[in-house]
Amino acid sequence: MTTTKTAFLFPGQGSQKPGMGKDLAEAFDVAKQTFAEADEALGFSISQLCFGGPADELNLTFNSQPAILATSIAALRVLEAERGPLKFDLAAGHSLGEWSALVAVGALDFADALRLVHLRGQAMQEAVPVGQGGMAAIMGMEADALAALCVEAAEGQVCSPANFNGGNQIVISGHKAAVERAMALAKAQKSRAIPLKVSAPFHCALMAPAAEKVATALEAVTIGEMRVPVVSNVEATANQDASRVKDLLVRQVTGAVRWQESVELLAREGVTQSIEFGHGAVIKGLVRRIAKEMVVQQVGQPDDIKAVEL
């Protein structure tokens, strides 16, 4: 019989919003200190961007990635400080959130992770000139059929599935014209297709230059022993081998986020309760589509600290 297990979950890009982490930092010294550490590591005030925006600056991918990571780790540290040592069995994060998960399990140093995701964001933005890439959410199409449709739409360009989010939603990524052709084909097959407001076509082959830069930056970083396994986006398997972490993070830049399979794996492993650390409830919404029986509690506001059931 499978025992009940707990997973720690971390959101990715799209969860950022001005005001994130502000109430936590005002209510708890450990959160205030965490944001001060982040400012020092990055050499600029990410805390100011988190707490007050402006939104257009916070939404720049090289700012939103460290901002989300800092807010997630601040929330985690507050819960640990207020409720004692936390026992959990697995961790997972959506895209950028995988980096937060690796900090949570001790694989990555917090300051190293902040600098790396700032660089990752810059590299992703620089990989494709603005306006040449695109992403779209396709609803109501099976994965195999959509993969074939992407091949048809590519016409020598890049177009491929980027996020398998569950609930019959798959995000595609690539050259803007190819993504637009794929959307037209999807609509012709009675599927919904919605263009996404993104600054670059993430998780596709166009991100290869960014993957190279991330690989180079990771060479100088030491990966620590992992307290618990982290479910990798690119393989949707639980990894606790520190020697594999760098390769998985590099492959994640161009590879699809296999979120549906990741949540299904957590459920198979016996995870019935989880905690989402960070601003908002993006992960809770995604998990609900895939594993309705899995309880997702949120820790992102001061009131959450006492309310969460451990």
Image (cartoon, rainbow, N blue to C red):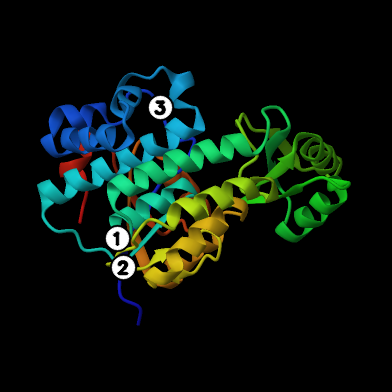
Tell me if I can see residue 26 in this picture: yes
Residue in the foreground of this view, choosing between 44 and 89? 44
Residue in the foreground of this view, choosing between 290 and 237? 237
| Marks 1 and 2 in Cβ contact (< 8 Å) | yes
Q: Residue at x 52, y 65 (%)?
A: 236
The amino acid type found where label 1 is placed reads Val
The amino acid type found where label 3 is placed reads Lys
Q: In which quarter of the image is residue 306?
A: top left
Q: Which residue is drawn at 49% across and 43% down?
A: 120
Find numbered disc 3 in the image and state the secondary structure of the residue it sits on.
Answer: loop
Q: Which residue is drawn at 55% across and 63% down?
A: 261
Measured in 3D between alpha carbons, the distance from the residue under mark 3 to the one under mark 1, in whole angstroms, is 25 Å
* Left or right, residue 227 beside residue 235: left
Residue behind mark 2: 228
* Left or right, residue 92 beside residue 48: right
| Marks 2 and 3 in Cβ contact (< 8 Å) | no
The residue lying furthest to the bottom in this view is: 1
Residue behind mark 1: 105
Which of the two discs, 2 and 3, labels the residue nearer the N terminus?
3
Badge nearest the viewer, 3 or 1: 1
Which of the two discs, 3 and 1, labels the residue nearer the N terminus?
3
